[in-house]
């Protein structure tokens, strides 16, 4: 059945939902030929909002019923709980949640042209963000982990059952290339002492398709950004970025700032906020086909932990996040300093980072002192949401 011909599903428990005989005239029916009321904000089918960062964060949407089995079959999952076993930090138990969001940079298949470089059969975590959703699910803190951070990776077992020995002083994104999602979660939990309740991953191609399906994202740049490596050429001003240019923006290192991964993270965080604001203005609920196309793209693009491995689970999860706007997001980078032995690498400022992890563990706001005097990428304020979508 095509998206165009798919009937508008009834939402269980919704007042005014109609069945097959709803056109019959009667006390509670509609007369034949009467025009249906347009959908309201309460009549929601599955939507997707992408939080991103050189990979992204795909969360979002609520609803029910839209070609459930087809959408459910699109999803890819990884069983993090089975791979990691019981030796993990305890769950918070206070209603807050931590979600590890990764953007992977596989060069295989359709990603090779987008990512550049050679297809060596491997992939790395191009972007990593810890999203802490506070109790009540009205606010969130997002902590980016620079991929160039030197860390001690613990021993880990991947989802195929292969055990990888611990390694000292390796780049953070090496955890993903070594043992995939499970080893990355193990590394993050070891570094932070926080339980990652959920895992979400999107690759280059999925990110680009999501942005295109949303109709682009509008941003304003205060400086020109030119980076041949990421195929990006933006004059200062307001732009509606399609998927390819959005991908170039969240991946650029040399087009703005000091050329470091830290500068790129600042651009990524600004784009995430612009994207969150944009989703509210897309007008998904007036077009069943647009709604379906976005849901189809989103469920194909995302890899989730097995607890989120069905459309119903994603709907329930995303429904709990829909009240978080960009104005209620705090976004920081893990407190780091440049490695004296290699300016292309960074190391964690342990005392300051501990302030961050302690705040999130106790479901408190991250104190400003945690990031004071730490390394930055000098790209803050270069990109922001357009004034038309704020």
Image: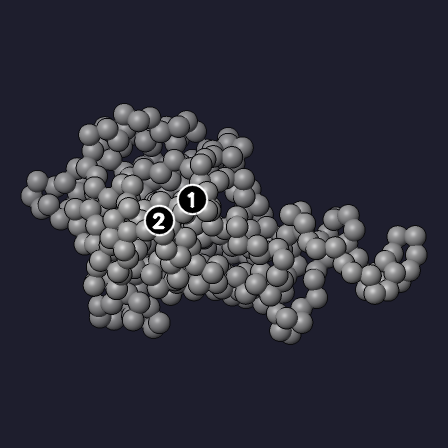
Disc 2 is placed on an element classified as: strand
Please name the residue that numbered disc 2 is placed on: 220
Q: Residue at 26% across / 60% down in the picture?
A: 233
Q: Do the residues labelled 2 and 1 touch (CB within 8 Å)?
A: yes
Horizontal arrangement in the rendering, residue 29 relative to residue 229 (left or right): right
Location of residue 168 with respect to 366 vertically, above or below: below
Q: Residue at 58% across / 60% down in the picture?
A: 291
Q: Residue at 68% across / 49% down in the picture?
A: 40
Residue 210 visible in this rendered orientation of the protein:
no
Q: Position of residue 223 (x, y in %)?
A: 25, 48
Q: Where is residue 250 in the image (x, y as percent from the top left)?
A: 31, 54
Horizontal arrangement in the rendering, residue 169 relative to residue 90 (left or right): left
Which one is earlier in the sequence, the residue at label 2 or at label 1? 2
- What numbered label is drawn on residue 363? none
Q: How crowded is mark 1: few (under 14 residues within 10 Å), some or many (20 or more)?
A: few
Can you name the residue that lies furthest to the right here?
A: 26
Residue 181: quadrant of the picture: bottom left
- What numbered label is drawn on residue 387? 1
Q: Position of residue 330 (x, y in %)?
A: 38, 35
């Amino acid at each position: 059945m095509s998206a165009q011909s798919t009937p508008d599903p009834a939402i269980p428990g919704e007042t005014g939902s109609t069945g097959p005989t709803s056109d019959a005239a009667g006390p509670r029916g509609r007369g034949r030929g009467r025009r249906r009321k347009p959908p309201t904000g309460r009549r929601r089918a599955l939507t997707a909002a992408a939080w991103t960062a050189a990979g992204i964060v795909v969360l979002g949407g609520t609803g029910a019923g839209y070609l459930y089995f087809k959408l459910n079959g699109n999803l890819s999952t990884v069983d993090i709980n089975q791979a990691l076993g019981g030796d993990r930090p305890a769950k918070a138990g206070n209603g807050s949640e931590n979600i590890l969001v990764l953007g992977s940079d596989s060069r295989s298949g359709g990603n090779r042209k987008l990512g550049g470089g050679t297809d060596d059969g491997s992939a790395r975590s191009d972007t990593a963000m810890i999203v802490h959703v506070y109790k009540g699910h009205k606010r969130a803190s997002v902590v980016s982990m620079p991929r160039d951070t030197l860390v001690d990776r613990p021993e880990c077992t991947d989802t195929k059952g292969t055990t990888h020995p611990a390694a000292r002083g390796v780049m953070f994104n090496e955890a993903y290339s070594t043992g995939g999602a499970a080893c990355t979660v193990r590394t993050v939990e070891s570094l932070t002492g926080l339980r990652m309740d959920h895992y979400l991953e999107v690759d280059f191609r999925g990110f680009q398709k999501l942005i295109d399906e949303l109709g682009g994202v509008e941003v304003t740049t205060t400086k020109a950004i030119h980076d041949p490596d990421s195929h990006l050429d933006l004059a200062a001003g307001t732009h509606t970025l399609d998927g390819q240019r959005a991908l170039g923006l969240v991946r650029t290192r040399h087009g703005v700032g000091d050329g470091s991964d830290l500068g790129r993270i600042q651009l990524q965080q600004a784009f995430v906020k612009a994207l969150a604001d944009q989703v509210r203005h897309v007008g998904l609920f007036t077009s069943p086909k647009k709604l379906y196309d976005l849901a189809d793209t989103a469920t194909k693009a995302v890899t989730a932990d097995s607890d989120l491995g069905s459309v119903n689970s994603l709907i329930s999860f995303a429904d709990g996040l829909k009240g978080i706007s960009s104005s209620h997001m705090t976004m920081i980078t893990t407190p780091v300093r440049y490695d004296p032995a290699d300016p292309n690498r960074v190391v964690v400022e342990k005392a300051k980072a501990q302030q961050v992890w302690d705040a999130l563990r106790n479901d408190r706001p991250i104190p400003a002192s945690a990031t004071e005097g730490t390394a930055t990428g000098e790209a803050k304020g270069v990109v922001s949401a357009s004034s038309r979508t704020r």
